Structure formats: C-alpha cells, structure tokens
Image: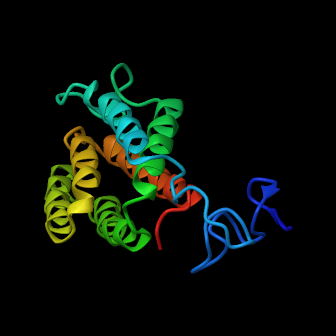
Amino acid sequence: MTMNTRTNMPGSAHGAGGGRGGTYGSSSGASHARPGGGSPEEDKRLLREAQQHLEAIPKDRGLADRDAGLSAPQLVEIAAKAGKAFAGAVKTAQIRKFHGHLVRFVTRVRTRNEDVAEVQLLKYHLAYAAGRDFKLKDFTAFFTAALDRVKSREDLERFKQLYDATLAYHKFEGGKE
C-alpha cells in the first residue's frame, strides 16, 4: 500500500483522488467517501455556516472593515468550509473560469484605477454559470453575498483572498476535475 503524501495516510501516493480518473482514497480500487468527504447534508451545513459568517457583515461595511469585516483567521475558516462544501458538486474548471474574470477585474483596478463599484458586474458571470448548471446555485449565492460587501480596494483584495482560499480548499478536499 502506498502513502498519500498530502495527508500521510494510507492511500494513493498521487493525492486523495488517486490521480486523474482514479478512485477516491485508496490505490486498491475500493471507493470510499465521495470527493469532499462529507454527505450532501454535511456540505449544506458547512456552506450555511460559511454564508452566515458573510451575512453577519453589514452590507454597508466591507469585507476588510476593521470592526465588522473578515479577519485572516475568519477568512480561512470560511474558505475551508466553503471549499469542502463545493468539492462534491463544483468542478475546478467552473471555479477557475470565474477566477479568470476576477483576476482581470482586479488587474484593471490596480493598473487603470477602475472604479471598485464595477465589481458588481461580476455577479452576472456567476448568474450565467448557475443558469447553465444548477449545481452552481449555492456557489453563486455564496460569492454574490461576498460581492455585496465589496466597497473599497481593500475589500476587493479581501474578496480575492476569499475566492483564492476557497479554490485552494476545494482542490485540497478533492474537488471535481
């Protein structure tokens, strides 16, 4: 038996998924938990907790607000929960597609001084993705709630950190290819 180098647990040496097209968790071919490791009910609970953290931030305050925003530990906790919840339903390519839109927008704000309020236009990319694939409805709702709290450049940077961290945890939890 090989050891999973990411977790030091028995399983595939190529990560939790056993490489592309492999079974989850073991090189013996036995299928264990689905990617994400939790049941659909557990995923919904995790996502609900993460969303509640975001919604606790007043809409007139930003994600980077000193008093009401997300601290670094809170951001990591929320991203870990959301990444795990999305791992079973959302494909990496779907996450990366929106990530491309986000990176282009952040670059425009940094280099061309574009108005941060224009970040709200990213919502239609989320809506389009959810319209094409119903499984993205929760993903869209989660990041729309975060976008509603982007009021400044600092908030935009915090939003990007949240998105990047969620993408990382999605991958870590064995997110769909």
Q: Quadrant of residue 23?
A: bottom right
**Number of dots carrying numbers:** 0
Rendered view: 38 above or below 95: above
The spot of residue 51 in percent (x, y) is 31, 36
Tell whether 124 sits left or right of 21. Answer: left
Taking the spot 34% from the left edge, 70% from the top edge, the residue there is 94
User: What colour scheme does the image use?
Assistant: rainbow
Taking the spot 65% from the left edge, 76% from the top edge, the residue there is 19
**Residue 21 in view in this figure:** yes
Taking the spot 21% from the left edge, 25% from the top edge, the residue there is 58
Q: Quadrant of residue 14?
A: bottom right
The spot of residue 47 in percent (x, y) is 36, 40
State the residue lying farthest toward the top: 67
Tell whether 77 sits left or right of 132. Answer: right
Q: Quadrant of residue 27?
A: bottom right
State the residue lying farthest toward the right: 1
Rendered view: 22 above or below 133: below
Tell whether 111 sits left or right of 55. Answer: right
The spot of residue 49 in percent (x, y) is 37, 31
- Residue toward you, 38 or 93: 38
Taking the spot 59% from the left edge, 79% from the top edge, the residue there is 20
The spot of residue 118 in percent (x, y) is 15, 56
Tell whether 113 sits left or right of 95. Answer: left
State the residue lying farthest toward the bottom: 21
- Residue toward you, 71 or 127: 127
- Residue toward you, 149 or 116: 149
- Residue toward you, 40 or 55: 40
**Residue 113 in view in this figure:** no
Q: Quadrant of the N terminus?
A: bottom right
